[in-house]
Image (cartoon, helix red, strand yellow):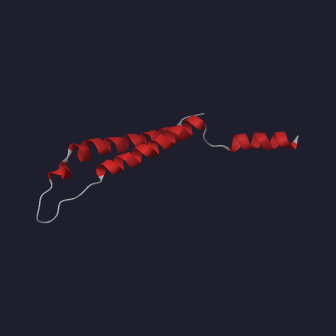
Amino acid sequence: MKNQNQKSEEKQSLLFNKKKYLILIFSIFLLFLGFLLLSGGGASGSTFNPEIFSSRRIVIAPIIIIIAFIMSGYSIMIKK
């Protein structure tokens, strides 16, 4: 009897199911990817580097980061 109660308590103590964990892990991966796309060299004081204003840094990376934050919130808020 005690073994069955312990098993049922263990199953109830999990906050997320497998689907939620996979979505959360994927959103964390997307977040790291977005910040990786944002990174890069900067301009020095004497020379101008046009790569600072590339579409990768201004458009693509912020969109990926916003999608990652939305997905992580979604994975937390959805019902089982």
Tell me the residue at 35%/46% (across/down). Answer: 34
Image quadrant for the C terminus? top right
Q: Does 42 sit above or below residue 59? A: below
Above or below, comparing residue 46 to residue 21 in the picture:
below
Which quarter of the figure has residue 21? top right
Q: Is residue 40 above or below residue 55?
A: below
Query: Quick one: quadrant of the N terminus?
Result: top right
Taking 1 as reference, is 22 left or right? left
The picture places residue 20, in percent across and down from the top left corner, at 55, 38
Q: Nearer the viewer, residue 26 or 67?
A: 26
Q: Position of residue 63 (x, y in %)?
A: 32, 41
51 displayed left or right of 61: left
Total residue callouts: 0
46 vs 62, nearest the viewer: 46
Residue at the image point whose x is 42% and y is 40% from the top: 70
Q: Does residue 31 appear left or right of residue 11 in this picture?
A: left
The foreground one among 23 and 78 is 23
Residue 13, image x, y percentages: 69, 44
Say which residue appears at 84% left-offset and 42% top-offset. Answer: 3
Picture coordinates of residue 24, whole percent (x, y): 50, 42
